[in-house]
Image (spheres, rainbow, N blue to C red):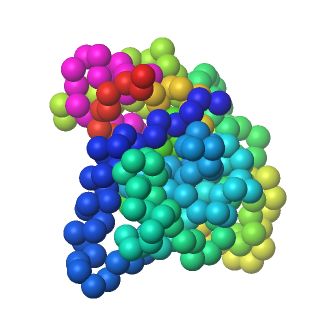
Amino acid sequence: MKKIKMLGVAMMAAVVMLLTSCLGDTNTVTEGYGFGVINNGAMFRNVAHVYGWGALYATDFDTLMNGDCVWLNFEYDTADPNNANSATNGFAYVTLLQKPVELDKGNFNPVVSNLDEALPGEIALKHGAYGVESPQYFAAIGDYLFLTPVYVGKEKQKNSWSLYYDPSAEPVMKDGVYVYTFYVRGVMETEGEGSDKDLADISPFYTYGHLTRINDKEYAAGRTIFALEFKHVQDFDEETGAPVWGDNVTTYRLRVDAPQQ
């Protein structure tokens, strides 16, 4: 599995300075949360690369595996002696407020086919990637995407999630930005209980280098921003059963970064 690029020393120092300035002179502790990907490449420790925070370390990560995807709630203390060398180490020490919530990965498929055919047990979605402006619902970390599909279902319903992307498809220019299209599809594996209600699942996807290749392509073209759009099945044709793709497409813009060395 490809290593996730560590924050550079300058970047880590900037994060530490920002956190310190936000805390003021008296309170050295701030609470944070977010999605993270475990990586064992930092000083032989398991660190979590957390969306919006960079690389963090807690002893609880020692039992996790490289590539595990988690949801974290933690405290960061600038007065902790362990954080005196955060900028040099490339990661910061944190204290978890609860055990890491391990997330089951969805299936990523770099082949797009049968868009006009329903999958066995496929469910309609209200959103393929809800809340892309909020770190509670969306994250892009290295080659990982964390999505939150929303659907009408029952409590305890179990679903499997798939994300499709065609690397041979050319991006489309929209509002001055090149947009790459992904397709989110869900299949009910176990029926739930009770009455129908709006539900949301969180599903991380490992894109096997495709997100990095998009970034590097945009960088080589001299662009600073690109976008991902997430299409979803919103209904099924009453006569044919074919999926009806929703027109409320979710789009998220990402900053282009310099390629990893």
Report the residue at 79% width, 52% height from top: 189
| Front one among 14 and 198 | 14
- Residue 83 in which image quadrant: bottom left
- Residue 214 shown in magenta: yes
The percent position of residue 233, horizontal first and vertical second, equals 55, 44
Residue 247 visible to the viewer: no
Above or below, 97 against 69 in this view is below
The residue sitting at 62% across, 75% down in the picture is 98
Q: Residue at x 59, y 63 (%)?
A: 58
Where is residue 86? Give x, y as percent: 41, 55
**160 sits to left or right of 74:** right
Q: Residue furthest right?
A: 190
For the C terminus, the quadrant is top left
Residue that appears at 33% across and 40% down: 254
Residue 69 showing in the rendered view? yes
Which residue of the protein is positioned furthest toward the bottom in this rendering? 26
Residue 212 lies in the magenta-colored region:
no
Say which quadrant the N terminus sits in: top right
Answer with left or right where residue 237 lies relative to residue 90: right
Q: Is residue 247 above or below residue 222?
A: below
Closest to the observer, 4 or 141 = 4
Which residue appears farthest toward the left when viewing the image? 176
Q: Position of residue 153 (x, y in %)?
A: 66, 65
Q: Is residue 142 left or right of residue 116?
A: left
What span is colored magenta in the figure? 213-232
